[in-house]
Amino acid sequence: MNININLSSQTLVLYDDSGNVLRSYPVSTALRGAGECRGSLCTPRGRHIIRAKIGKGLPVNTVFVGRRPTGEVYSPELAQKTPQRDWILSRILWLSGKEPGFNRLGECDTMRRYIYIHGTPDDVFTQAPASHGCIRMRNADVVELFDLVPVYTPVMIQA
């Protein structure tokens, strides 16, 4: 299996080992566009892998902070209490770059930038650039993807 994320079309496509499309999902990538370096708030391009999967078996809309569940479950009411929060929900697929000097090591390290594929509030999700660098998905979609892919699945992110 492998994943292709297209920044222009704001889509994530999951392929099987023969190159057949298994699933296609709308996503939301960085508001600031493509970029690899720390502090850019951009989505990194190039070859990556899923380094870790976090959240297996937890309820949909589980809230994560620092990759740990907070014990909260997202709701619009919770969002009203903390409107500035950058919600990471349901599941986390933590990405690691595969291209030293471009998206791995030094100032441009995807994993050290904490770039994930993760759930976001469904009531505010749009298939348009809006994140701080991560790849946001609807919660049912990220749970489905999480269950379909193993750790070390290749991920290609392109403009």
Image (cartoon, rainbow, N blue to C red):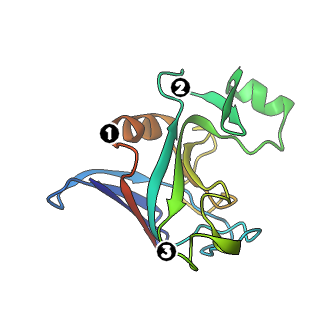
Element class at badge 1: helix
- The quarter of the picture where residue 83 lies is top right
Q: Is residue 127 above or below residue 146?
A: below
Please state the horizontal and vertical placement of residue 13, each as a whole percent of the image.
Answer: 34, 57
Please state the horizontal and vertical placement of residue 76, each as a whole percent of the image.
Answer: 71, 29
Q: Is residue 20 above or below residue 61?
A: below
Q: How crowded is mark 3: few (under 14 residues within 10 Å), some or many (20 or more)?
A: some
Say which of marks 1 and 2 sits in front.
Answer: 1
Numbered tag placed on residue 99 in the rendering:
3
Q: Tell me the kind of residue under disc 2.
A: Val
Please state the horizontal and vertical placement of residue 129, each as a whole percent of the image.
Answer: 60, 63
Q: Residues within 10 Å of mark 1 (few under 14, many from 20)?
A: few
Residue positioned 85% across, 29% down in the render: 81
What separation in Å lies between label 3 and label 2 (alpha carbons)? 33 Å
In the picture of the structure, the residue carrying the numbered disc 1 is 148
Number of marks drawn: 3
In the current view of this chain or complex, which residue is farthest to the left?
18
Q: Tell me the kind of residue under disc 1.
A: Leu
Say which of marks 3 and 2 sits in front.
Answer: 3
**Residue 133 in sight:** yes
Does label 3 or label 2 sit earlier along the sequence?
A: 2
Does label 1 or label 2 sit earlier along the sequence?
A: 2
Element class at badge 2: loop
**Residue 127 in sight:** no
Element class at badge 3: loop
Q: Do the residues labelled 1 and 2 touch (CB within 8 Å)?
A: no
Q: How crowded is mark 2: few (under 14 residues within 10 Å), some or many (20 or more)?
A: some
Please state the horizontal and vertical placement of residue 37, each as a whole percent of the image.
Answer: 69, 74
Say which of marks 3 and 1 sits in front.
Answer: 3
Numbered tag placed on residue 60 in the rendering:
2
Viewer-closest of 36 and 111 = 111
Viewer-closest of 41 and 82 = 41
